[in-house]
Image (cartoon, rainbow, N blue to C red):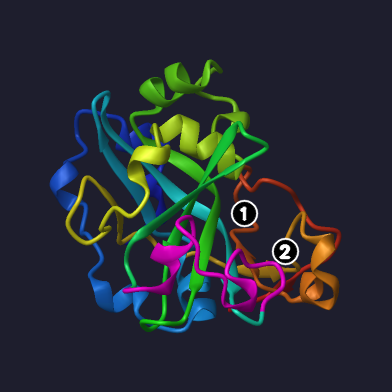
Amino acid sequence: MPRALWSTKVADSSDFDPKRLVRLDRGFYARPVLTVARECVGKLLVHRSPAGLLAGRIVEAEAYRGPEDRAAHSYGGRKTPRTTVMFGPAGYAYMFLIYGLHWNFNLVTSQNGEPHAVLIRAIEPVLGTDAMAKNRGVRADKKELSNGPGKLCQALGLDRRHYGMDLCSSDLFVASGPKVRVARSRRIGIDYAGSWADKPWRFYDPDSAYTSRLPPSSRSAG
């Protein structure tokens, strides 16, 4: 599908048919976390919210592969009330709060018992941008609308209530989207993880202005 059909201008027009949104099934998530993270880029994150249908094209995602990954909340096999959903099955939402202020949204992936997840770091608005702007308190044409994990959750109205939601059957889901160029880099903000911080497990669309931060160097992922 041509990328132009998914631009904010076209998607917010009366010509856009929401029925074109094709929800991904559980098979998409029940695969290795690095594969899912890479293939998330270009897909649509959709929330049928009280404010209407809100959606953004995923332009940045990071893989976390516990229990070995020191940057993962499930490092060392930690299974707490917060991390339980990460242990499967795949295709559920893992929400967590940082700094006591900002919610982050993750996709649970892989097989049961493997606490792997993909953090969605940024989206490019596609549907419901005016409602997103109201949620965020910023102008709809500003990249700050959704160029970070906390920002996108606020824009889409995601919070504690969405923890554990089934992405295959609820009002929160990932839909198919255009194929885009994908680059990769080390993950952001996890220097505490030692050598794991250097894993090139951040995947992003290098042509989008909505990525949360441009790394000093990157390489093509295909």
Q: Earlier in the sequence, mark 1 or mark 2?
A: 2
Q: Residue at x 49, y 43 (%)?
A: 124
Label 2 neighbour load within 10 Å: few <14, some 14-19, many 20+: many
**Image coordinates for residue 27, horizontal then vertical, percent:** 27, 78
Marker disc for residue 187 = 2
Q: Residue at x 85, y 72 (%)?
A: 194
Mark 1 vs mark 2, foreground winner is 2
Q: Is residue 179 visible?
A: no
- What range of the chain is rendered magenta? 69-89
Residue 12 part of the magenta-drawn span: no
Task: Say what amino acid the circle numbered 2 marks.
Answer: Arg
Q: Residue furthest left?
A: 19
Q: Is residue 132 visible?
A: yes
Distance from Cα at disc 1 to Cα at disc 2 = 18 Å
Q: What SS does tag 1 mark? A: loop
| Quadrant assignment for the N terminus | bottom left
Q: Image height check: is 215 above or below 162?
A: below
* Residue 207: image tag: 1
Q: Amino acid at mark 1?
A: Asp
181 w.r.t. 16: above or below: below
Which type of secondary structure does the marked residue at label 2 adopt?
A: loop
Check if residue 88 falls in the magenta segment.
yes
Residue at the extreme front:
80
